[in-house]
Image (cartoon, helix red, strand yellow):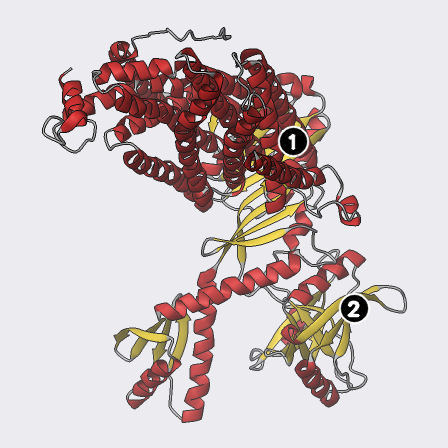
Amino acid sequence: MTAFRWRIGLVLALVLLFAHYAFANFFSKDTRSASPLLPDMAMRLGLDLQGGIHWVLGVKLEQAEQQELEFLRENLEAVAKDEDFQVASAQVDGTRLRVSAFGANADKVDAWATRTGSLQKSGVSGDEREFALTTAAVDGVRKRGMDQVLEVLRRRIEDPVKGVQDSVVTRQGDDRVLVQIPGGNVDRARAREMLRVTGFLEFKIVRDQAPSEELLRGRFPDGLPPDRVIATEHDKETNRVLMAYLVDAKPAVTGDKLKDARVDFDRQNRPIVAFTFDDEGGRIFGELTGANIGQQLAIVLDNQVYSAPRINSRIGNRGQIEGRFTPQEAADLAVVLRSGSLPIPVQIEEERTIGPALGADSIRRGIQVSAASLLAVLVFAVVYYRMSGAYATISITIGMVLIVGLMTMFGATLTMPGIAGLVLTVGMAIDANVMIFERIREELRRGKTPRAAIRAGFSRALPPILDGHITTMITAIVLFEYGTGPIKGFAVTLAIGLVATVFQAVVVNRLLFEVYPGNRPVATLSI
Amino acid sequence: MAFFELIKPDTRIDFVGQSKYAIALSSAIVLLAIVAMFVRTPPIRMGIDFTGGMEMQLHFEQAGSVDEGGIRQVLGGFGLESSDVIRLGERDEGVYLVRMQRESAGDQNELVDQVRDAMAKELGPVEVERVGFVGPKVGEELRRNGLLAIGVASLLLLVYIGFRFTPIFAPGAIVAQVHDVVVTAAVLVIFGREFDLTVLGALLAILGYSINDKIVVYDRIRENLELHTAQAFPQMVNDSLNQTLSRTVLTGGTAIFSSFALYFWGGPVIATFGLAMAVGIIVGTYSSLYITTPILLALQKRYGVTGTSAPAAKKGGRRGEKESRAARA
């Protein structure tokens, strides 16, 4: 009897615990976090239920390899200068670095390649040798590339000011990123802005300027001087060129030395972006501005000049960008600057946008229909099995509480297929109860006493229940492994549901039969 | 004690005897299903999940004045007349799906906005409820992963049954599973339903349900093998089917009921799932009764219950005796 009490107590405690978590879903986030009694958790609704944007982004990792080769090529040129050997030509061609060198110089190139530790010779023809990244180097480059992309996207999308709350950025496979931005009112076009490749900020001293690119070029009939390029300033509305500037090809300082960027307002109350450099950036910027007082400094973002103010005095680690922004544009630019540039371009491979109305409608209908059909089935169970049917109703209800509680605890996401998974789970729960009751009836027909029949019924029904649940669990695991998005949601709900089903059918039901008839010598059983 | 019974306990249906007709019928259906899937014009409709492309779901306020032709006409203005226009649900709901082949998501936003504005001008207020874009690479992967999932799941279940029961139990369950999936898919094709991730999910759920159904019967056969050692194997199998029949009908019935509820009242998004589940459960129940057991019987005849060798030679004692008798029967 004490063991029995213990079991009752344990089951009640478990049910209360999960009911506690399940209960939290009925309150809003604010109420939950304000109340000391409620757990600050809730089931997450999938994008198909609450609306939002779902992206699968392909990361162009080949470009990371190219960038690495480009970096090595520059390194080769620097080394050749230092060690005094001649490289006739060196260029990156896809995933190959082609180097031409003559005589003894070629050996020096080979020695350099070996020293880098990441190049292997993939071919020689005449004086030209071809290098490729080693497998280890490729793996390293790709992994680093993915990490950087994830980092930057996370910073942009999860940005506290402009980003969207509860959005999720995760890696998917080797070269994909999954982005989920909930909320049906997110502006697709603006969200897409966050995938902007660059946001690459450069500061360059202006060497010359003219109202149009042609005019500026006209001043250099023999072509632009080496190490100089033209950058243009555009009118935001019309995209017309306002001014063309001749600037250094190599920037003096770049945006990766930025520590912070935020929206501010100038004296006329126009939005500007104020930024702060880190220590090193501040030092370089100070030197640059100190040496060029009276000159213009072009602030170049993604090869477009935002403004080119005159340097009046040495500037330390603070500066600002004025560019006739709207407040929104200024905020967006600040985010891009804060997060740094996206080192590798990404491409949208899958996009799903679900409006909030559709989401709300499908959740309402899905839940209503599921609840109504469950109710109908439970009524049928009571008609068919009478008292035992009522037991099934109690235990299946407890099972549902467990499912919702477990899903809340795990922070699982409820999707439309997830609701379908719940319906399937309910089917399995009913099956488990039916198997037990049918078995008890059978044992009664064979002339067993109710007590013996209950014992035999439960123990004989257990193996098929377990086998059925284990095989369905196998399916759920495979689905989780190979499925994406909504199908994963189905798998999770199903897996959680299966655990709860076994518990309610085998443990809760058994306990109910122990409460009544228990050890009483009853002559008949309502089943 | 009197029980409320749908299936009387003394029910004795000769499932094993009827199974030869069932096998013939099922072979014909499966063959027909395969033919139907390839001959049907248009052939199986694949959703953008598997083909790649773009789709938008439009909800028109003035449902009465909108039809597929009108929508297609507006699309023609964008050079998109080759798009599929599919009505979801009843006409008075005014919900349509427009699908087009596109390689990249590049200018999708603008296009969606432009199409919406043009539709609103021609056909009255409209809301874009959903936009989907799947690149060709992802589409191909989803397709491959889907097939892989079905394959891997089947294989794992085969191994599980092989170990939990004996190896001869596995093939029948797997053949029945393939049968269930093929027939369900064929019915969906006949209903003009589209294959997307939701249908794939449903097919996998059917796989799980179907195997559960078979296991209940198998478990009964295993129990009877230990209890009624003198009985001929085919008779024992038939008894097992009849003993579990009440459960089969009750569980199957309630599951079919719930699935049809989703089909009829669940809304356009989940209707296909409901239909697939309902059909799959009907087919799965049928295959438990008629497809699984004849294969089990044929294998038992050849390899014995343990599936390791000719039945009579193995293991002496009561068990071996029983198996050999069963094999002769």
Q: How far across and down, in percent of the image, does residue A175 sit?
A: 47, 56
B171 left or right of A40 in image: left
Residue for point 85% across, 63% down: A270
**Disc 1 residue type?**
Ile
Residue B175 falls in which quadrant of the image? top left
Q: How far across and down, in percent of the image, does residue B86 sit?
A: 55, 25
A164 left or right of B170 in image: right
Chain of the residue that carries numbered disc 1 in the rendered image: A
Question: How much space separates mark 2 and mark 1, taking CA atoms?
Answer: 47 Å
Category of crowding for the residue at label 2, using alpha-carbon neighbours closer than 10 angstroms: few (below 14), some (14–19), many (at least 20): some
With respect to residue A467, does B192 lie above or below?
Answer: above
Residue for point 38% across, 24% down: B216
Please say whether residue B317 is visible from this viewpoint. yes
Q: Which residue is mark 2?
A: A322
With respect to residue A103, does B132 lie above or below?
Answer: above
Q: Which residue is mark 1?
A: A363
Q: Nearer the viewer, residue A35 or A69?
A: A35
Whichever of callouts 2 and 1 sits on the residue coming sooner in the sequence is 2
Chain of the residue that carries numbered disc 2 in the rendered image: A
Residue for point 68% across, 46% down: A41
Please say whether residue B38 is visible from this viewpoint. no
